[in-house]
Image (cartoon, rainbow, N blue to C red):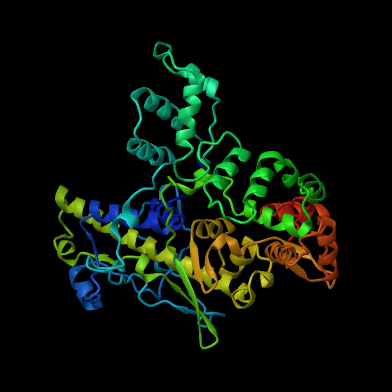
Amino acid sequence: MGQQLTMTPQLQQAIRLLQLSTLDLQQEIQEALDSNPMLERQEEAEDYDSPDTLAEHGNQSTIDAAQGSYQESYENASGNEDRGGLEEGDWHERIPSELPVDTAWEDIYQTSASSLPSNDDDEWDFTTRTSTGESLQSHLLWQLNLAPMSDTDRLIAVTLIDSISSDGYLEASLEEILTSLDPELDIELDEVEMVLRRIQQFEPAGIAARDLSESLLLQLRQLPIDTPWLEEAKRLARDYLDLLGNRDFAQLMRRMKLKEEELRPVIELIQSLNPRPGAQIEASEPEYVVPDVIVRKHNDRWLVELNQEAMPRLRINPHYAGFIRRADASADNTFMRNQLQEARWFIKSLQSRNETLMKVATQIVEHQRGFLEYGEEAMKPLVLHDIAEAVGMHESTISRVTTQKYMHTPRGIYELKYFFSSHVSTAEGGECSSTAIRAIIKKLVAAENPKKPLSDSKIAGLLEEQGIQVARRTVAKYRESLSIAPSSERKRLM
């Protein structure tokens, strides 16, 4: 004989709900409402049932939002029976009466009226909110259908369009395109090139080019002929693009016989073009982020509250719950009793999820007041263990509750994991977060002299002057994470 700890189905459900994003949770709630007749939405105009009414119907209705919390509970697998519920102390733990940050607990499950505009609203555009993005190929085929063309040329054009990448470049050579066509059509290579020229006149400008130089030239040819420095820009894009890519401005001025003040507007004209013309046509559907927590400042105090619009208000249906008879062992009565128990646990799991999310978000705001007040440079080091210790939970629970959960702040919407970062020692014996160091590096690069950009070693030296001890390779890692090019590629004339 032996004993082992296993998770109850109720705890497994609570953990599963805890790690769901808001959009996934809304879908989960809808599935529960569809499958369990004991669950129903609490309409906004309705009030919760009183305790006396609940006792009369024999059910536990909607939740008092100020009670209960998530606590990992285990069932002894040696033979203890699940009584359909846990003792009060297993699920409820007292929350400190005074939290370091103000929190708003009321109406956790309240759902306000839909925020969608009415149909007669001038700003409401149904197609822009419901239609999927258009692919580059479909956009080009639409233009092809409007162009007068023979059947053979149209076949060539469709083959060419299929060979265009998402960036807008022709991935296959004209010889490969010709080989893929039906030999019986007796098509020559110059016919394929002629059709390609037709497609290169489509929108967006620069499409169907075989390399960057050709794409830039196509875009320049569509500009008005009186555009300043147009001919010089065409010459640069055709003959000296490699020198521009290497930032060899001295060689460029010598080859093009231009002075520095003359080369500068030419480069500006080149930089105004799009090196990836096909990227203008976005085929992917937009991704929506619904914030779980809202943080705002009121009377010099930071308030933390759940997003009430993202969470429906649930309760037990008192009418169906009243049909349950205690001594009845019929199949129908047993089914209703099981559904009632599942509904209770589902509501309790939702309450547990939201209270855990509130406690974690409150501690994050308490630790990162500096970020909310002053920005990324004031971000403090923070790890999962710090929050787990503050709220009395395991690090795995904190990891679940901070994944795919978002916080709306006056500075923007951030995933809760964004507020966690490692630390670097300072000369004064303190600590500086990696997020703050990235913000400082970004600020230094933005203020650098474009003609003499800062090297990684120079940035490390400037950080050391501020008391932050960071190695050059660490600066390079942070710079790459910010998508900042090396100093050799950031050099400019202007």
Q: Position of residue 396 (x, y in %)?
A: 56, 55
**Residue occupying the point 41% across, 15% down:** 182
**Residue occupying the point 36% across, 63% down:** 348
Image quadrant occupied by the C terminus: bottom right
Instruction: Say which quarter of the image contains residue 427.
Output: bottom right
**Total number of numbered labels?**
0
Instruction: Say which quarter of the image contains residue 64.
Output: bottom left
Q: Nearer the viewer, residue 449 or 199?
A: 199
Q: Is residue 96 above or below residue 9?
A: below
Instruction: Say which quarter of the image contains residue 135.
Output: top left
Q: Is residue 386 left or right of residue 415?
A: right
Q: Is residue 352 left or right of residue 224?
A: left
Q: Is residue 11 above or below residue 468?
A: above
**Residue occupying the point 83% across, 70% down:** 467
Q: Position of residue 220 (x, y in %)?
A: 57, 47
Q: Nearer the viewer, residue 137 or 292?
A: 137
